[in-house]
Image (cartoon, rainbow, N blue to C red):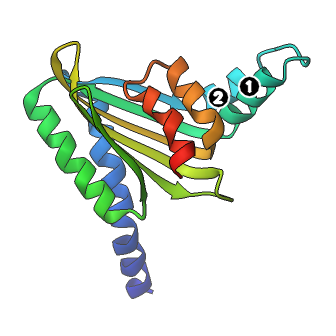
Amino acid sequence: MKKIAIVIIIGLLPVITQAQSFAKYENMKDVDAMVMTSKMFKMLAKVDLSEDNPEAREYLKLIENLDEIKMFTSTTASVRSQMQKDVENYLSSNSLDQLMRVKEDGKNIRFYSKGGKNDNYVNELFMFMEGEKEGEPISVILSITGEIDLSQLSRLTSDLKIPGAEELKNVEKKS
């Protein structure tokens, strides 16, 4: 019985430590953090919108199936360096596929995903951006989990004003 417990703990350790590696950014002084949970999405999905608007219905369907959005940004060199290390560790210990890389306008943006129920959906969309925003160095970690419809995702990230969101319009075309 002890051996089974030890095997389970060892198996869960990478998941626990990876979740903690990004959670630490929520309380850091030099990090802007945004975390939206499934409760927020469920609340938004209950907003009374016109049933005649198919675009609004699709948008609600997208957010209703999300579990969490986490975004961490920093312009501090030491934090940006730690973010890069944590992202590399996260990517090496999780089964994420690279969707695309974009390098332009002083930004290096990489998108990764974890497969979903079919080719149009993913269970996780992960983005890491390094570069400049308004002439200042910046790093951004974005993780969106849930049942994510790639065709609707760029609209959501644009509405949330996430750096690199404009590049998501191309993810559907490249995947």
Placement of 2 over or under 35, stated as above or below: below
Residue drawn at (29%, 63%) of the image: 92
Q: Residue 83 in the image: state x and y as whole percent.
A: 21, 40
Q: Amino acid at mark 2?
A: Phe
State left or right for residue 171 relative to residue 104.
Answer: right
Q: Residue 139 in the image: state x and y as whole percent.
A: 23, 31
Quadrant of the image occupied by residue 29: top left
Residue drawn at (31%, 42%) of the image: 22
State left or right for residue 157 relative to residue 7.
Answer: right
Residue underneath mark 1? 45
Residue drawn at (82%, 14%) of the image: 49
Quadrant of the image occupied by residue 131: top left
Front residue of 15/64: it is 64
Placement of 111 over or under 106, stated as above or below: below
Front residue of 71/105: it is 105
Residue underneath mark 2? 41
Front residue of 174/150: it is 174
